[in-house]
Image (tube, helix red, strand yellow):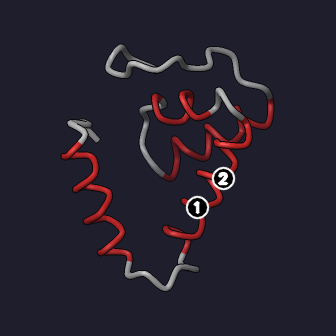
Amino acid sequence: MANDYGHLPKVEELNETNADRLATWYSKAYEDDNLFRTLAIDETTLSMFLDWVGVMYGGDSEIDRHMVELCRLRMANQNECFH
């Protein structure tokens, strides 16, 4: 589902592990895979990001979820990201 909005290269073919991760991404986040496929260029970066998402949105963070969402929206707006 990758589109032309991004300027960075994206992984076209995913290995089995990342295909499973992407399926979870679709079910728990949204059906746009640009960020996922961009981060998947580097396995360590993708893993770190997904671990961070798990902490921030999984309930283990001490930061209020509403604050996390406000920061995400502000960063998206500042970067002219349509998410």
User: Does 28 sit above or below residue 39?
Assistant: below
Determine which quarter of the picture holds residue 64: bottom left
Residue 29 at what x, y percent from top left? 46, 49
**Helix, strand or loop status at disc 2:** helix
Q: Mark 1: give few (<14), some (14-19) or many (20+) Cα within 10 Å.
A: few
Tag 1: amino acid: Trp
User: Does 39 sit above or below residue 9?
Assistant: below
**Helix, strand or loop status at disc 1:** helix
- Quadrant where the C terminus is found in the figure: top left
Residue 46 at what x, y percent from top left? 64, 42
Kindly identify the residue that appears in the image at 62 percent across and 39 percent down: 23
Kindly identify the residue that appears in the image at 78 percent across and 26 percent down: 15
Kindly identify the residue that appears in the image at 32 percent across and 57 percent down: 72
Seen in the image, is 11 located left or right of residue 43?
Answer: left
User: Does 45 sit above or below residue 5?
Assistant: below
Number of the label disc, if any, that sits on residue 48? 2
Kindly identify the residue that appears in the image at 47 percent across and 35 percent down: 35
Number of the label disc, if any, that sits on residue 9? none
The residue indicated by pointer 1 is 52
Tell me if label 2 and label 1 are in contact, CB under 8 Å: yes
Residue sitting at the far right: 16
Q: Mark 2: give few (<14), some (14-19) or many (20+) Cα within 10 Å.
A: few
